Structure formats: C-alpha cells, structure tokens
Amino acid sequence: MKVVHIAFECAPIYKTGGLGDVIGALPIYQKKLGLETYVLMPGYGFITQLPRLPKSSVPVIYAESPYFKEKNSKHDPKIAAPKYAHFALQALFELKKRNIVPDIIHCHDWHTGLIPFMLKNQPDSFFINTKVILSIHNIGYQGNFPLKFLDTPETAQILPLLNKNSKRINFLKQGIHNSDYILTVSPNHAREIRKRQVGFGLADVISKKRGRFKGILNGIDYDIWNPKTDKHLLQRYSRAHVENKKYKNKLTLQRQLQLEINKDIPLFGMVARLSKQKGTELLLPLLSQFPKRRVQLVILGTGDKHYEKLLKRYDKKRFGEWLSVNFRFDEELAHRIYAASDFFLIPSLYEPCGLTQIIAMAYGSLPVATRVGGLADTVIEGKTGFLFESFSSAALLQTIDRALNVWQNPDKYQLLQKKAMMGIFSWKKSARQYVKLYHKLLKSSK
Ligand code: ADP
C-alpha cells in the first residue's frame, strides 16, 4: 500500500512544532509495518533538502513554489493563502511527475486543506482510486481568507472551481468536506470538537462526517526522545538510575541560565508556543509566586509578541535566580529543559494531543496540565502527573502546590516519576491503528 503524507513541516528537516515531530516519525513506523510511505512537503529555499527521513528509507518529495523560496511571515494572510493553495497544486503535480499513484493521500492540517478539493477536480483519472484522509492537528488554525487572495498568477486556476457565492475560503473546512475520512490526534479531542464550544465553528461540518471521523493518539519517537541516549545532555540517565543522575542536568541548566544552583530547588519547565492556546495568560499573574515558594521556572518559547513583552517585565534583577525566559526556537535547550526539570507546565486552553507532556514524562518530569484533549488521555492524575479542570490561574496555582506537596515526599515523587517514565506512548501502537484504518477505507471502496 502506497501512502503519501503531506504537511508543511517535517522534523528534523523543518520543524516549528508538534506536527513536525509527527511527520518525521509516523511514516517511518508505518514503513516498518510494510507500507510504502512517502513524505511530501514544501521545498523551502532555506532548508537542507534531505532525500529521505534520517535513519530510514522513507523518501521525502519537495514541492517547489516561488512562495517557498524565502522565509516569510506565516501570519501575513495575503501570502499564506496563495502559498498553501499553490502547495496543493504543486504537491499533486510532483506525484504525477514521478508517476506515484497513492492508495492513500494523508493530509495534515489546514495548509493541505485544498488538496482533497483539488483531487476531486482533476482533469484526468490519475488519482481515481486514491483515498484521501485529513488529520486535524490544530482546529484553532483554519486558513480562513478572502477568496480574492487566490487571484495570483500561480493560483488563479483554482477560483473558477470554487463556489462563486462565497467571498471567503476556509482551507480546513474545504479539507473536511472533501476528504474520505477525518482524523484528529487524540480520542478525547475527537469527542470535544464535535461540540460547538470547542469546534471552532466546524463542529457541524465534523458532525456530518459521523462514522468517518475519529481520534488516534499521537506517539513520540523514543529513539529521539530518550534520556539514556540523548546527545544534547551532559548527563544521560535511564529510568533505573533517574534518582541518582537526572539532577545533574538540573545543576548544569541552572548554571547555564544563571539560576541559583541547588539540586533541592524544584524546577518547573515549559516549552511551548507563547499563545492563548498554551495558557500563557494563566501563568503571567503567577510568576511572582515562584520566588515566594522557592521554586524555579524555565520557559522556552516563541510566538505572540504581546506575551513576550509581558514576560520581559519580570526582569533579571528581581527574578533572575528563579525565572529564566528564553524567546527562541532552540532544539538543544528544549532537550535540556525536559531533562533538567522536575515538573512540566502545560496549562493549555485546548490541546489536540500535545507532545510536550509525553516527552516530559519520558524524561521523568511530571506534567502539571489542564484536563483537556490529549492531556487527559495521556497524563494520569496523581500517578504520572497533575491535572486541573478549570482554566484559571487559581486552579493552576493550586495544582502547582499539589505537585510541590509530592516533591516534599521523595519516595512518593520517585514513584510517580518512575511510572511516568514507562514509555508507553510509542508510535508503534498508533501506527498500527492508522494502518488498520487505511485497510478499512480501501476495502470499503471496493
Ligand atoms: P504544538 O501545538 O506547538 O505543536 P506540541 O506539544 O504538539 O505543541 O509539540 C511541540 C513540539 O515543539 C515539541 O517537540 C516541543 O519540544 C517543540 N517546541 C515548541 N517550542 C519550542 C521552542 N521554542 N524551541 C524548541 N522546541 C520547541
């Protein structure tokens, strides 16, 4: 079975978040199960275009477009709209050019939302037997633009195919509407987005897909996220020796970030896009509580400039020994924070799956997270982490205090830590569920 995954990012070639991790791993695990998998992504001018995913034989195909030449703001809608519309055209063109006839085209997120639509509007029968699946990794981003933005030399051919009564185009909605099957990345989030409150305006379109919509939990690649072999760490450790070794990573990070160096100070980590979704605003009013409780917090994040400005107010002079905020995308620092921290903050408003809590657990850092989406599916309250219900700073602070209570009892803390480190969220299990679904879909069309 030939399966082509199409997405705008794929780690380690180009990564901005969790979708990159997924596309860099899932096709490899599916290949191990006997599928012929491919990755198709934009041929950005500023990346090294590897021919295959590292340590695998999964080919990577690059779609070319003038829009991919330079790093331009993803947030400028006048650019984003034609950029990803052209991606849809070029992606299918690349497959035809190479004579790759997929059994399944697996699209990921709004950037690929026009591909299912274009598949329905092919002038020939090249893709006639191809089934198309769309995975929603983040329903909060839909690619909703004025239609006129597609009036460019590269994309104007799409306009006559679209509904002339509508002045706007919603890429994700188009994708949902035109796909054979819709997925999201955790069973709990699949339940959530059927409801109007969490469906971001698409609950009704999704509900129409009854029987052709479900959630499959993401995994992580334990070959990459493994404290025993992690090349970014100065002190590697395994689950068996976590209590004697992990703290050395804390001392190293405290030194590197000029925090007070002391292994007994509990350290909270956070690696996230600074956005409303990730609960940055819940954290802001609590920052002064960290020094009060003699607790350290290390944040690594990029994103909303508004939050950066607010976080910068917590200056080095007053908070320097307790708080370190780092505004950049830094793979190595991320690995070091997972390894150094005792607890990990994920106070998300909504979380389709979330990978950082799964990675944190693999590194023996206990998540403190909202009970939403994939966080509720992966963190077990009181056993592998701490969950809270209401999206409020007060609830977050209460839960931080519950976590600190456990920290006071080293035997109990270690019990939770060892359970969190069991490594049960491997891609192996999820990859099998995808393959089963692909077979079902192909069988149903015969
Ligand atoms: P998202 O919604 O942003 O995709 P996930 O939890 O699914 O969130 O995945 C985030 C991924 O991106 C993780 O691998 C995390 O370590 C990484 N990440 C996020 N922000 C940064 C950053 N500033 N520097 C390095 N890695 C980051």
Image (cartoon, rainbow, N blue to C red):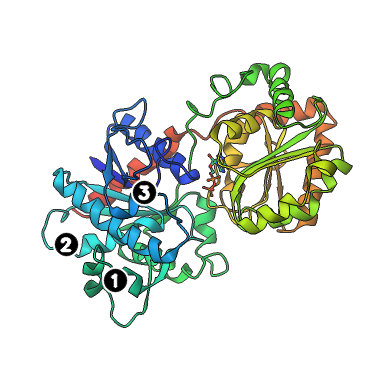
Q: Nearer the viewer, residue 123 or 333?
A: 333
What is the three-letter code of the residue carrying label 2?
Answer: Gln
Callout 2: few (<14), some (14-19), or many (20+) C-alpha neighbours within 10 Å? few
Q: CA distance from mark 2 to mark 3?
A: 20 Å
Give the x, y percent position of residue 68: 34, 50
Question: What residue is disc 2 on?
Answer: 122
State if disc 3 and disc 2 touch (CB < 8 Å). no
**Earlier sequence position, callout 1 versus callout 2:** 2
Question: What residue is disc 3 on?
Answer: 7
Q: CA distance from mark 1 to mark 2?
A: 20 Å
Q: CA distance from mark 1 to mark 3?
A: 23 Å
What is the three-letter code of the residue carrying label 1?
Answer: Asp
Query: Which numbered mark, 1 or 3, is in the foreground of this view?
Result: 1
Q: Give SS at disc 3.
A: loop
Of all residues, the one furthest to the bottom in this rendering is: 165
Q: Does 238 sit above or below residue 429? A: above
State if disc 3 and disc 1 touch (CB < 8 Å). no
Q: Nearer the viewer, residue 165 or 401?
A: 165
Q: Residue at x 11, y 57 (%)?
A: 125
Res. 151 mark: 1
**Earlier sequence position, callout 2 versus callout 3:** 3
The quadrant holding residue 317 is top right
Give the x, y percent position of residue 441: 28, 51
The quadrant holding residue 253 is top right
Q: Residue at x 19, y 47 (%)?
A: 95
Q: Is residue 217 visible?
A: no
Q: The N terminus appears in which quarter of the rendering? A: top left
Q: Is residue 32 left or right of residue 242?
A: left
Q: Give SS at disc 1.
A: loop
Of all residues, the one furthest to the left in this rendering is: 124
Mark 1 close to ligand 1, CB under 8 Å: no
What is the three-letter code of the residue carrying label 3?
Answer: Ala
